[in-house]
Image (cartoon, rainbow, N blue to C red):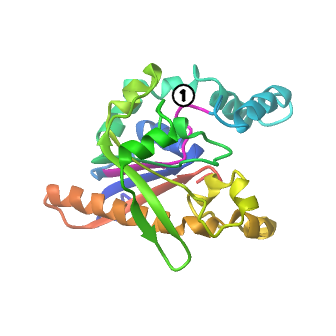
Amino acid sequence: LEKNLHFKSISILGNSLGGLYARYAIAELKLYHGLRPAAFVTTAAPHLGVKSGTLYGPLLGIASYATSNLVPSSISQTMHDLVNTNGILNELLQERYLKPLRSFSARIALAPLSKDFMVPFSSAFFTNISPSQFKFQAGTPRRISNDDSTLDLFEINNTILPTPSAAQPLAQLGWSFAALDLRPPDEPLLLQLLPLAHNKLVALERTGIKRLAAPFERTAIGQPVMDDLANRIMHVAASTMISSSVIESPSVLFLDEEEGQ
């Protein structure tokens, strides 16, 4: 980015565990170099860990204990951190990690309303309200679509949701939240019962042998979500630059657990 001087703003998107990576990275790395922080976005990120709310949490806890001497220490530590909130999750609530978050023009969190096997709704939105309560507060959804799917997006912008006391420093920054049901009416009932929303949310595209799961995952359903999010990030970046009287190209940094990038 330092070599491409036409970039004047930076937005960061962290998917799943990448959302925690992103919160850590913006404090540890010298990312800005004069770039104006625009949008900070997390998609189904386990801000409160995964100790409860999904089947994945207890399984991860068992796996962390059972494989502590069988897997690389970095993997074992990650599993441990996600089921124990007194570690890195607590550290990320310190001011040195909150201050860079505060500098972004917008902070946005996305999550499925249900059927996320890996990250519970409460963790992705660091809140203690239920999905049904969120929908009630959001009111009439905004419909987004493409040629393949139509989805209802429930949004609450620039707010502080009711949150556990431990997570209040993060919530007090003010966030915009968007959630949706990723089970379209035309999807077979059996597939609707499967907890596949985590990958659908970001329209995850499989490669190699993993493509065999595509007919069951139907992750392309989430493509309108990503298209809408991309437009929103660009809008925030443009607004950030206009407020600074600068009209140049924005940059987006994407952090994802799947690819480790």
Q: Is 97 or 211 nearer to us in this picture?
A: 211
> In the rendering, at what x and y percent does residue 11 appear?
37, 54
Q: Is 179 or 96 nearer to us in this picture?
A: 179
Amino acid identity at mark 1: Leu
**Residue that sits furthest to the left in the current view:** 245
Q: Which residue is mark 1?
A: 89
**Residue 119's image quarter?**
top right
**Residue plotted at (59% across, 67% down):** 221
**Is residue 131 visible in this depiction of the protein?**
yes
**Residue plotted at (62% across, 49% down):** 257
> In the rendering, at what x and y percent does residue 219 appear?
64, 65
**Quadrant including the C terminus:** bottom right
**Residue that sits furthest to the bottom in the current view:** 147
Circle 1: element type: helix
**Residue 160's image quarter?**
top left
**Residue plotted at (45% across, 56% down):** 253
Above or below — where is 197 with respect to 203? above
Is 258 included in the stretch rendered in magenta?
no
Q: Is residue 194 left or right of residue 29?
A: right
Q: Which residues are magenta?
A: 38-49
**Quadrant including the N terminus:** bottom left
Q: Is residue 130 left or right of residue 7?
A: right
